[in-house]
Image (cartoon, grey):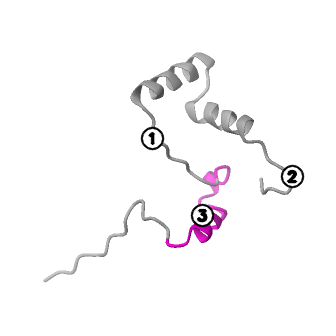
Amino acid sequence: MSERPSRRGFAKRPADAEQWIKAADTPPRDAAASSFTARLTIDITPDLRGRIKIIAFQRGVTVADMLRALLEREFPPTDGAPS
């Protein structure tokens, strides 16, 4: 009888929220990914997704770059906050 390897959940909820938040600050193992420190996933409607993609295409930028710029504008660093 073969043993099945244990499977960890893809989006397992953290037991300790503070520790989970701080864990995102660990440096990536892949040097190519060093410019990105965390991934953010949100649920949006297909209509909104389509509008975002069209606007990004019209501006000649990627959706990711456009949304990063938007988030930087809306949530600028504050004094004493980690950047």
Circle count: 3
The residue pinned by badge 2 equals: 79
Q: What numbered label is drawn on residue 43?
A: 1
User: In which image quadrant can residue 3 be found?
Assistant: bottom left
Residue 54 drawn at (x, y percent) = 51, 19
First-in-chain label (2 vs 3): 3
Magenta segment:
15-36
Measured Cα–Cα span from mark 3 to mark 1: 28 Å
Residue pictured at 67% horizontal, 38% vertical: 71
Nearest to the observer: residue 53 or residue 81? 81
Seen at 50% across and 25% down, the residue is 53
* SS class, disc 3: loop
Q: Which residue is mark 3?
A: 29
Are discs 1 and 2 less than 8 Å apart at CB? Answer: no
At x 63%, y 34%, the residue is: 65
Please report the residue visible at 56 percent of the width from the left and 50 percent of the height from the top. 39
Horizontal side of 64 relative to 2 (left or right) equals right
Q: CA distance from mark 2 to mark 3?
A: 29 Å
Residue 22 highlighted magenta (yes or no):
yes
Instruction: Report the amino acid beneath label 2.
Output: Asp
Specify the farthest residue to the top. Answer: 58
Disc with the residue nearer the chain's start (3 vs 1):
3
Give, as a three-letter code, the residue at label 3.
Arg
Give percent across and percent down for residue 42. Answer: 49, 43
Query: Is 78 situated left or right of 32 in this image?
Result: right
Q: Is residue 39 above or below residue 63?
A: below
